[in-house]
Image (cartoon, rainbow, N blue to C red):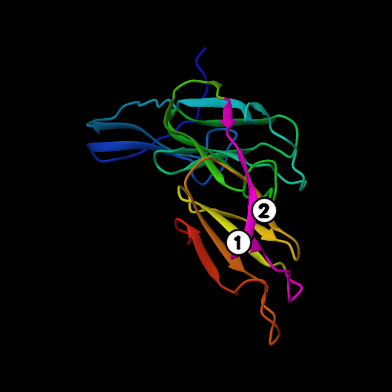
């Protein structure tokens, strides 16, 4: 028995046409993906019937961290989003939740996709870096299937010194500064705040990549003694916008 689908009727002049299905307004994401799809380009010369098939697939999987189950969110927030971006720039996504296996499932049209994982909300010091990791570029997807997504996460730590000595304590009562790491591939920045006293240590989760590094002094007393460092930003490595 033939499947019952959506029907259409259109009056047009004879000519060459591109047939497009568009659900970018996402009026019903349960029926079709919230995407635009070019279905055919053809010459129309007379009355007729043109049935159109939408190639919808479902992809699911688990996001892991260094080969292990992703940890829970210490901030009780979403740990991040799996993003599928098609060749027209439309992005479909699914949330992996706050705890448990970081599972996702996304319905989409078959085609070519970039696949990313983004963590815009579980910050700071969430289950994964507060950055976007590109996992696939130009990935061809044609059928339903399972695509597990492995994240490689690095932990970087160290100490910020002043003239090769321990950074002085705060004069204003504020944190002494921020150390920024800017991911060149996306322009996203994460930072660690230096506490008020003692060694100015930091620890950050990062994805492998090229980073710019900068320090900004934030211990800025008004009319008082000098702060722990100048109230300026200094570039330490690469480029930070």
Location of residue 147 (image quadrant): top right
Determine the secondary structure under disc 2: strand
In the rendered image, residue 149 lying in the magenta stretch gets the answer yes
Disc 2 target residue: 202
Residue interval drawn in magenta: 148-174
Vertical comparison of 119 with 8: above or below:
below
What residue is drawn where x is 64% and y is 63%?
165
On residue 23, the disc is: none
Query: Residue 37: x percent and y percent?
Result: 41, 36
Vertical comparison of 233 with 125: above or below:
below
Disc 1 target residue: 164
Vertical comparison of 132 with 199: above or below:
above
Q: Residue furthest top?
A: 1
Location of residue 27 (image quadrant): top right
Q: In the displayed structure, does residue 195 sit left or right of residue 144? A: right
What residue is drawn where x is 35% and y is 26%?
49
- Judged by depth in the image, the label closer to the viewer, 2 or 1, is 1
């Amino acid at each position: 028995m033939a499947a019952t689908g959506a029907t259409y009727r259109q009056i047009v002049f004879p000519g060459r046409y591109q047939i497009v299905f568009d659900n970018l307004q996402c009026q019903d994401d349960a029926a079709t993906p919230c995407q635009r799809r070019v279905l055919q380009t053809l010459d129309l010369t007379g009355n007729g019937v043109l049935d159109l098939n939408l190639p919808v697939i479902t992809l699911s999987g688990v996001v892991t961290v260094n080969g292990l189950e992703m940890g829970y969110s210490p901030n009780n927030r979403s740990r991040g989003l799996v993003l599928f971006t098609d060749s027209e720039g439309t992005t479909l996504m699914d949330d992996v939740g706050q705890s448990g296996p970081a599972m996702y499932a996304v319905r989409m049209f078959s085609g070519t996709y970039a696949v990313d994982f983004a963590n815009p909300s579980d910050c700071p010091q969430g289950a994964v870096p507060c950055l976007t990791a590109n996992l696939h570029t130009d990935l061809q997807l044609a059928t339903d299937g399972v695509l597990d997504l492995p994240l490689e996460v690095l932990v970087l730590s160290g100490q910020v010194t002043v003239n090769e000595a321990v950074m002085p304590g705060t004069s204003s009562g504020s944190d002494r500064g921020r150390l920024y790491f800017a991911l060149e591939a996306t322009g996203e920045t994460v930072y660690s705040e230096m506490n008020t006293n003692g060694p100015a240590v930091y620890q950050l989760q990062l994805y492998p990549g090229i980073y710019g590094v900068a320090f900004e002094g934030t211990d800025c007393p008004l009319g008082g003694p000098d702060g722990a460092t100048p109230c300026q930003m200094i570039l330490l490595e690469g480029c930070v916008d």
